[in-house]
Image (cartoon, grey):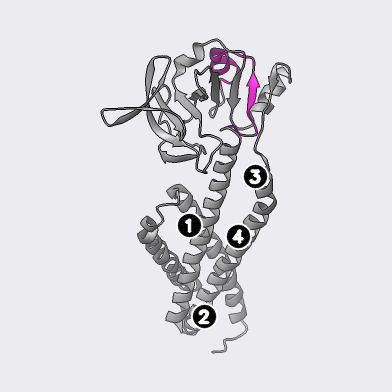
Amino acid sequence: MKKKRFFVSTILILCTYLLLIFVSEYQRQQDTLFFESNDLYSTDHLFVKETFQTLIKDTFKTSSDLSIFISLESKNNDNVRGYFSKDYSDTHFPLSNGSFFSTSNTKEALVGKEVATVSENDCTYYEYNNKKYKVIGYLGITKPSFLDESVLINDSSLFNMPTTYLTIDGKKINTIYYDRFGKNNSYQKNMGLDRKVNSDYFSPLIYSLTLFIAIVCTVLIAYLIFTDLKKENFIKYILGTSTLKKYKSSLFYLLSTCIIPMFFYLLILPLFQLISIHYFFMYKLFLTQLLLMCFSFTCFFIKEERSNLHGVNL
């Protein structure tokens, strides 16, 4: 019976991991689709009458996630923009192939599927203003995509070109700007938001249900492990084993139950190549579930130890 419940507990833990991973991937995909629909802008973006140097060295000097776009003239139908960011480590931009910029001013480009490019020495380039930019990724994950004719160039020198408005983006960037300068000389242009609105109608229900299932499963696993050890702890109580020693032994058994499925999950992780797994997220997930499980188990253990004071029934 103990082996059977150990197996059930292990399977429940593994299923909980997988459920949370898939829901996290669902959220990532929805965010990516939103950026694709909204021309790579978040709902916090603003078109402002400011210079590039003023934005990065004065207005948003302390904003660590500031991104700036500049719309550029094109001889064809390409929607060409220059791009700069203070943080290239995290992006929700929709890429069907390739990778995002690794740092600023790399002289590289991201292009849509309908954008004309040239090939030289096994590399693909986008030519703008008689300058060639190496293509490292392709924009747009849907077919057709709003970004099929879009070009994003990572070249800070493009911000020296004359323009009326620059686009700024980042977490609560619009609120920060409004607080300092009001709403004069700035505006927003959100488009394609129907997909995001429809998604948000169901997403909170999905996340709430997932969280509820994860918590219930974690408490249930703690209870199954507690019942596995119940008779064994009764015998130890009769033999005079200290409460602390019993608790340490039980906790070790609980930890082994959690760690085994975690290792198994890491072994099968390469099978999920289509899912962007963040190992730091996995670590936080594992630690959170482990703490909740230990807390639940401790509550069951303390309650049982108190009842033992009134006698033991095997």
Please say if 285 is above or below 92. Answer: below
Please say if 129 is above or below 104. Answer: above
Q: Position of residue 80 (x, y in %)?
A: 51, 23
Q: Earlier in the sequence, mark 3 or mark 2?
A: 3
Residue 220 among magenta residues: no
Q: Mark 3 — residue?
A: 195
Residues in magenta? 41-61
Residue type pointed to by label 2: Lys
Q: Earlier in the sequence, mark 4 or mark 1?
A: 4
Disc 3, SS: helix
In space, the residues marked 1 and 2 are separated at their CA atoms by 25 Å
User: Is the C-beta separation of discs 1 and 2 under 8 Å?
Assistant: no
In space, the residues marked 4 and 3 are separated at their CA atoms by 22 Å
Residue type pointed to by label 1: Phe
Along the line of sight, which residue is nearer the eye, 13 or 312? 13
The residue that appears at 58% across and 72% down in the rendered structure is: 300
Q: Position of residue 160 (x, y in %)?
A: 50, 11
Q: Earlier in the sequence, mark 4 or mark 3?
A: 3
Mark in front: 1 vs 3? 3
Please say if 37 is above or below 242. Answer: above
The residue that appears at 67% across and 28% down in the rendered structure is: 189
**254 sits to left or right of 165:** left
Residue type pointed to by label 4: Thr
Along the line of sight, which residue is nearer the eye, 197 or 225? 197
In space, the residues marked 2 and 4 are separated at their CA atoms by 30 Å
